[in-house]
Image: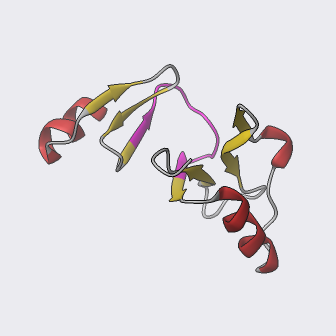
Amino acid sequence: MAKQLSAIFQFALKEGSSSNFAGGAFEVMKGQGRGVGGHIAVRTNSIPRAVAYLERQGVIFDKDAAKEVNGVIQAVFFENEIAGFAVHLVQDQHLA
């Protein structure tokens, strides 16, 4: 599906180990992953700031499963699904 989205929207295709990307707009998982209906990623320029803000709004995160690279959180899921979708924050790589 990432190849189709890449062709339709003229986005660069990047193949990863667990998912493929069509530009920075679409991530297509190779396997099921989290969420009954799949998952939704929300890109942010600062995961720690976004987590702090959302926690004040009552959002709970699954911090034990956060993905870190060199001590910097790259992705963290909400603890609960929304309408059958897992939701996670993802660090904008240009700002990491």
Residue 43 point in image, percent of width and height: 51, 56
What residue is shown at x 71% (from left), y 31% (from top)? 70
Vertical arrangement, residue 37 with respect to residue 46, above or below: above
Q: Nearer the viewer, residue 48 or 41?
A: 48
| The N terminus sits in image quarter | top left
What residue is shown at x 82% (from left), y 63% (from top)? 60
Write the start and end of the magenta stretch as one range. 27-40
Vertical arrangement, residue 72 with respect to residue 82, above or below: above
Residue 1 visible from this viewpoint? no
Q: Nearer the viewer, residue 96 or 65?
A: 96
What residue is shown at x 75% (from left), y 58% (from top)? 80
Residue 59 point in image, percent of width and height: 77, 69
Q: Is residue 27 left or right of residue 68?
A: left
Q: Identify the residue at the far top of this view.
A: 17
Vertical arrangement, residue 50 with respect to residue 89, above or below: below
How would you classify the magenta stretch by its main secondary structure?
Answer: loop
Residue 75 point in image, percent of width and height: 65, 45
